[in-house]
Amino acid sequence: MSDKNARPGREEYGYLCSVDSRWRDNDIYGHINNVVYYSYFDSTINRYLIEQGGLDIHDGEHIAYVVSSGCDYLEAAAYPEPLTVGMKVDKLGNSSVRYGLALFGAEGAAKATGFVVHVFVNRESGRPVPIPERLRAALEKLA
């Protein structure tokens, strides 16, 4: 576990999303299992892309693939603690974006920090494409 003074705060993230921890998120050790953090991050990213960028996950011409991800666990979280995910854009490329993410509890600094890299592709071919303009505009707000 890490020094709380070295952890980022909510103010470092342009988008904050509440997530509900669930009973099943806890593991045998009594805290939220590490793999669940990734689902919180993924849900937050996709909510933003759908609501702010107009991503059509069902029928859109373009979709985003996760090509890299990581997480540093700084302090345990446990059900039924209210949680918030902070999201920002660390790097915006032509067809890819690297998100910076953090998981926060009810108060205080981040309990975990992470990143996810998306590559935008054509749904049919699976080949990279430039980030569509509406999505790019939404992502630039977090850069």
Image (tube, rainbow, N blue to C red):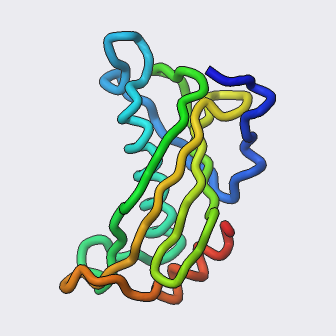
Where's residue 20, x and y in %?
A: 46, 35
Badge count: 0
Residue 84, compared with residue 82, is above or below; it is below
Q: Split into 4 quadrants, where in the image is the C terminus?
A: bottom right
Which residue in the rendered view is the most extreme toward the left? 124
Q: Residue at x 38, y 35 (%)?
A: 36
Residue at screen point 60% across, 43% down: 102
**Quarter of the image with the N terminus in it:** top right
Task: Tell me if residue 63 comes above or below residue 67 in the rendering.
Answer: below
Say which of 54 and 87 sits in front: 87
Task: Check the image and name the residue furthest to the right.
Answer: 5
Residue 130 position (above or below residue 107): below
Q: Nearer the viewer, residue 47 or 1?
A: 1
Q: Examine the image and state in which quarter residue 15 appears.
A: bottom right
**In the picture shown, does residue 87 fall above or below 118?**
above
Is residue 13 found left or right of 53 in the rendered image? right
Q: Which residue is at a point 35% across and 26% down the rendered structure image?
A: 25
Residue farthest to the top?
A: 29
Which picture quadrant has residue 5?
A: top right
Nearest the eye: 74 or 104: 74
Q: Position of residue 116 (x, y in %)?
A: 47, 56
Q: Position of residue 49 (x, y in %)?
A: 47, 68
- Left or right of 120: which side holds 84? right
* Horizontal arrangement in the rendering, residue 87 relative to residue 79 (left or right): right
- Tell me which residue sits at (35%, 83%) in the image: 128
Q: Position of residue 130 (x, y in %)?
A: 45, 88
